[in-house]
Amino acid sequence: MKNRKLWGRILAHLALLPFIIFAVFPFYHMALTSLKQNRELYDRVANPLLIRQGATLEHYSRLLWETEFITWTKNSLLVTILASVVSLIIGTIAAYALARLKFFAAASLGTGIFVTYLVPTSLLFLPLAQVVNWLGLGDSKWALVVTYPTFLVPFCTWLLMGYFRTVPKEVEECAMVDGATRVQALWRIVLPIAVPGLVCAALFAFTLSWNEFIYALTFTSSSEQITASVGITTELIRGDIYYWGSLMAGAVLASVPIVILYVFFLDYYVSGLTAGAIK
Amino acid sequence: MAIGSVGIATATRPTSLRARVSELLDRESWLGPIFVSPAMVLILLLVAYPFCMALYFSVSNAFIGRPSTFIGIRNFINLWDSDAFRQTFQNAFVFCGIAVGAKVVLGISLALLLNQQLWFKRLIRGAVLLPWVIPTALSTLGWSWMFNSLYSVVNWVLLNGGIIDPPGPNWLGQKYYAMAAVIIVNIWRGLPFFAITLLAGLVAIPKELYEAAEADGAGPIARFWHVTLPLLKGVLGIVVLFSTIFTFSEFNIIYVLTHGGPINSTHLFATLARQVGLETGRIGEGAAISLYLFPALMIVVWAQLRYVRKQAN
C-alpha cells in the first residue's frame, strides 16, 4: 500500500515535468541568449540549448551604456509606483464604503466597479488617446500615471471588498462603542486586520502597471518618456534588424523587479489570483 | 475669569465645526458617498466618457485632426465588406476557441496534478505561475526569438528529435503556423491563471465526498466525472468567462510576435483597431472595429455577473 502511494507520487511529479518545462523554458532560453557571444548566437549548427564558446556580458553593457534603458526603467518605476499608490488609496476607501457602509445606490456602484474591471484596456485605448491629448499629456509618462488607475482602481476595490467583508463587524463596533469615530475605527482597527489584503492589492497593482503595454505604447513615443517594455520592443529593433542579444538582456533585466517581488510574496500572488476572479 | 471665557469662546467655535464634520463623517449615508467619489470620478472621466466617445466615433467618419460628422452604421457595413476585417473576425473566433479550449483541458489537468501530494510544492507552484507574472510584451519577445526564421530553437529541438524534416516551418511567416504560434504563446501565458484558480476550487471540495464515492465502488475516472467536475463547474464557469473576454481582446502577444501578419492572418480586433485607428488615422473605423463585438462582450459580462451573484448568495 505504502509502495503504491510512493509510486503515485513519483508519477505525479513525472506528469508535471512537461508543464514545468513548458512554463520555464522560455525564460531559460532568454537568459541563455542574453549571455551568448554573437558568434555562437548566430551559428546555425551550434546547439542552442547550451553555451559552449564562453559567456559574455557584452549585450548587457551595450544595453546599459549605448541605449536609454536606464531612463526607460526609471520611467517604469515612477509610473508604476505613483499609479499603484494612488490606486491603492482610492481603492481602499471605495472598497471599505462598498463592503461596509449602507448608503444610496451602494449595491449598483459595486456592480459598476465589477463591470469596469471587466472592460479590457484594448477596447478604450483609441478614445483615451484623445482624452490624453486634451489633457495636454500627449507623449508624456504622466499620461500613464493618470490612465493606469482606470484598471488598477477597479481591481483593488474588487479585491479589497472581499477582504473587508471577512473582518467581523463586531471588532469595529467595539471600537466605536469605546468612543472612536468610524474613520478612526477604519484606520486603527480594520486596516491593520486587512494588511494581507492590502499587501496583495499593492503587489497586483505593481505587477499590472509594470506589465502594462498597450497604453504605454499608444500614449508615449519619445525615448525620454517611454517605459521599459515599450523601449525594449520598439527602440532595440531598427527596421528589420533585431539585436537579439540585447533584446533578451533587456527582457531579463526589466523582469527582475517583478521576479524579486514574486520570490518573496509567492503566496500572496496565489491568493490574489484566485480572489480576484472568484470573490 | 474674563480672559478664561474669551479663551473658551474662541476655542469652541472651531471644535464645534470639527465636531460637526466628524459627526457627518460618522453617518454612513455621508461617509459612503465621500469614500466612493474619487473612484467614481475616475471611472466617469476616464472609462465611461472615453467609452461614450468610442460609441460616437464608431458612427462617425472621425479622422485624426479633422472635424467629424455622423454617418450612421456605415463604418460597420464597410468593415463587413473588407477582407482584412472578415479575416480578423474569423481569426478572433479560431484564436479564442482553440486557446480557451486548450486552457480548460490543460488547466484542469495541471490543477489535478498540483493537488497531489508533492515534494517541492512551493517551488513547483512558483515555476508554473511564472509566465503569468513576467511582463507579457517581454516574454513574447523571448518567444519571437524561439520562433525565429533562421535560429528557431523550437525547430532545432523538433528536428533533432526526428519529429519534423528539415528545413522546418517558418513559424511567424506562414499563415497557419503563425496562428499556431500566437495560440501557443497565449496558452502559455494564460495557463497559470486557469491552473491556480481551478486548484483553489479543487481544494474546496470536501474529502468526504470522494470517500463516499470510493465506498460506492467508483473508480478514479468515475470520481472525476461525478464528484470533481460537477463541483468545479462554478469556478470553471467564471474562469472561462474571464479568459474569454481577455483572450478575445488580446493585443500584446499579436503585436510583438506577428503584428497581425502574414497578410492579416493573425490580426485580432485590438491589433486591427490600432492599425486602422492610429497608424492610418481612421479613428471612426478603428472604434467600430473595437466595438464590433461589444454586444457579445456584454452577454459574457452579464453571464459573469449572474455567476458572481449566485456564488455570493
Image: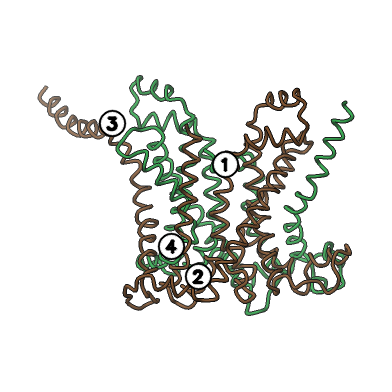
Q: Which residue is mark 3?
A: B27
Q: Which residue is mark 1?
A: A272
Dividing the picture into quadrants, the one containing residue B281 is bottom left
In the rendered structure, find residue A143 and report the number of the disc placed on it.
4
Q: Which chain is brown?
A: B
The amino acid type found where label 2 is placed reads Arg
Q: Chain of mark 1?
A: A
The amino acid type found where label 3 is placed reads Arg
**Which image quarter holds the N terminus of chain A?**
top right
Q: How is the image coloured?
A: by chain
Instruction: Note whether B5 is above or below A214 in the view shown.
Output: above
Asked whether disc 2 touches disc 3, contact meaning CB atoms under 8 Å apart, the reply is no
Q: Secondary structure at mark 4?
A: helix
Q: Secondary structure at mark 2?
A: helix
Marks counted in the figure total 4
Q: Which residue is mark 2?
A: B274
Same-subunit check for callouts 3 and 1: no
Q: Chain of mark 2?
A: B
